[in-house]
Image: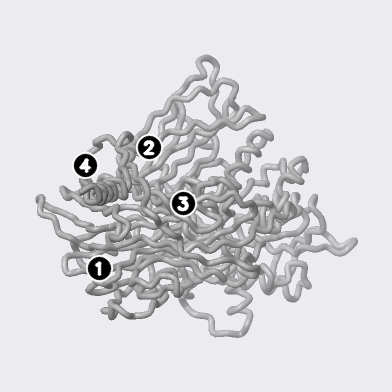
Amino acid sequence: MKVLLTALSLVFYFLVYSQPVVNLDQYKNNGAKVQVKNHLVTIDWPAGSSSRAKMMLDLRSENALLQSLQIAKSNTYKEIAKDLDPVFILRVGKRKLDPASGGWDIFFDKVPNQPYTTERIAFKKQKASVHTEGASTIIRIDQLEAAPFSGQLQITVYNGSPLFNIAAVMSTARDSTAILYDAGLVNKKGNWKNIAWSNVHDQMEYTHPATNTRSIDKEVKYRTIIGASETGSLAVFPAPHQYFYPLDEAFNLKFTWYGKNYLDKIPEFGIGIRQEPTGDRRFVPWFNAPPHTEQRLNFFCLLSDQSPDLALAAVKKFTNNDAYVALPGYKTMASHFHNEFISDVVLAGKNIPEKPEFVDVLKKAGLDIVKLAEFHGPGHPKGPDSLRLVELKALFDQTRRLSDKEFLLLPGEEANNFYGGHWLAFFPKPVYWVMSRKENAPFETNDPVYGKVYRVGNKAEMLRLLEKEKGLAWVAHARTKASTGYPDKYKDENFFKSDTYFGAAWKAIPADLSWPNLSRRVLHLMDDMANWGYKKYAIAESDIFTITEQNEMYAHLNVTYLKMDQLPKYEQGWLPVLETMKKGRFFVSTGEVLIPSFAINGKSSGSTLTLSGNKKVTIEADLKWTFPLKFAEIVSGDGEKVYRQKINLDHTQAFGQQHFKWPVDLTNKKWVRIEAWDIAANGAFTPMIWIQ
């Protein structure tokens, strides 16, 4: 009898204590209902359009975590998927932290050329907790392990949408670490009716794989792979920009997968997202993973009771169909493209297409203005005239031909001479100039074929040319790549102090998954320049080479929304574009977050605000977004320090717009600007309002 009681006690202990304890102390009913019963956690949340979504999590170690995923209209639930487990593959490499290359801001690194590890992250269900943060509900489950990283699984559901995020939140004590990750959802039975995706030509494709189909890497559009059941679809996709670390090329490297035995490390049948570790085989920096930072290796899922094509249509709304939406009173501009159409096609003796593919791609992306950066490698910027002037004429002829009343393709170059580091030149009309001048040769001549021609021999003459032709210059990829140390090294030079020196350009270098926003490098530079006492700004830059329909363009694009009512005509010059930039009348965006207005006492960005009395004022801003917002930040400076006031926006739901009023104390401040970021690290930022 005693033995029997002992055995029963052990069984009771196992049943009660072998399952994770669920802590609900941080849970509040925000519209999402959480219920815990034995080993099962059920989250039922409002999913928009009078529908609800339900997730049932099984915390027993021997069972799949996602027991059931359901969606309901009129309180009738349909099970879309069941018995799924999240999986993650973590690659861990060595970061080259050379200060001469920018330290953690490095781009010139080739991580996969050195030894690295590839490991499936182990998941052991130990304890769980539920947290309410605004309109989202987070379930945290310990423990994840993949040496030298450890952490927890986090699943976040968002009120107002059938959207949820799955993240392996991991950290390490090891220094100089770079990482890459693949992820997805797997089940042992492979119970999808179909797997679906859009090909790069925007056409839906379907397959009905056998349960033993070996994993296949798929080249898709919109970064999405979809599992379809008899009752609906489950779309799996990454954060549209954050998941893509910086590269020189936007090649489509087959960013999704489906099937069994993925990388010979995931035996179950799955669908998911992936990265190609060798990237574009140029410089491949991966993601930063500084010690003791929490890296969010994450992906999104969208539930739908519709067919895969309609589920994909719902996913595409989050990126406005991978395009930059028109905004009344604004024109969109993208900059810094090394497509080399002039050198590789026009001057190479090839057939010149009436409508080049790259122009069509850029137009479809919703771009009104595109500034090129030709002759970056090819070309003869220093002459001789017989080559240089022919190249420029071809550039001007083709950009004029390919521009129209709704699209401006503008000539531009990454000059990289005279000033130090790399920088871009931008003139408001075609200008013939050679980046060298022989001794005793004139600065300016009149050529019988090309008209006025300038020859520049030093930085003083470069400044003179920019002043004479009303041009602008700015540092390319500041403080990284070949501009490491710039513009800091020449901030006291006359050319930098000049109004012709615009400032910088922003691109997400480096990539760090512990940040709730994208790269801070140029944002910090913009603040530093303001504290140096100069009215300098930063526009968007893409800095990529090949532009094709096949490429994953949207992930590597960003845009400047210029406050302009209409496009100038190419033939009349585009001085209004440069003037709008100089005045700071714009904002920069990844596309998902927009800032149509930002003002204090009626003064908008680029303006000077006079505060003679009370320095406690109200910032007014209009925001528009697709993914739910995460936070906004009011950034200000006093000439020495930078101050950041974070505004929590986690109450927002998907696809919204709102007029905000935020109090701020500008005592002793000399400038102020704002940023806004969403749950996928997409965002937007403004130039400064100057204060006196």
Q: What label sits on residue 534 in the rendered view?
A: none
Q: What label sits on residue 649 in the rendered view?
A: 2
Could you classify mark 1 by the number of other residues whose Cα lies within 10 Å: few (under 14), some (14-19), or many (20 or more)?
A: many
Q: Give the farthest residue toward the front.
A: 1
The quarter of the image holding the C terminus is top right
Q: What label sits on residue 308 in the rendered view?
A: 1
Query: Residue 187, position in %: x, y?
Result: 30, 67
Q: CA distance from mark 4 to mark 1?
A: 28 Å
Look at discs 3 and 2 and give the one toward the viewer: 3
Q: CA distance from mark 1 to mark 2?
A: 31 Å
Nearest to N terminus: mark 3 or mark 2: 3
Rendered residue at 64%/58% (across/down): 95
Secondary structure beneath disc 1?
helix
Query: Residue 292, position in %: x, y?
Result: 56, 45
Secondary structure beneath disc 4?
strand
Query: Residue 583, position in %: x, y?
Result: 56, 41
Relative height, residue 388 to residue 161 (above, below):
below
Nearest to N terminus: mark 4 or mark 1: 4
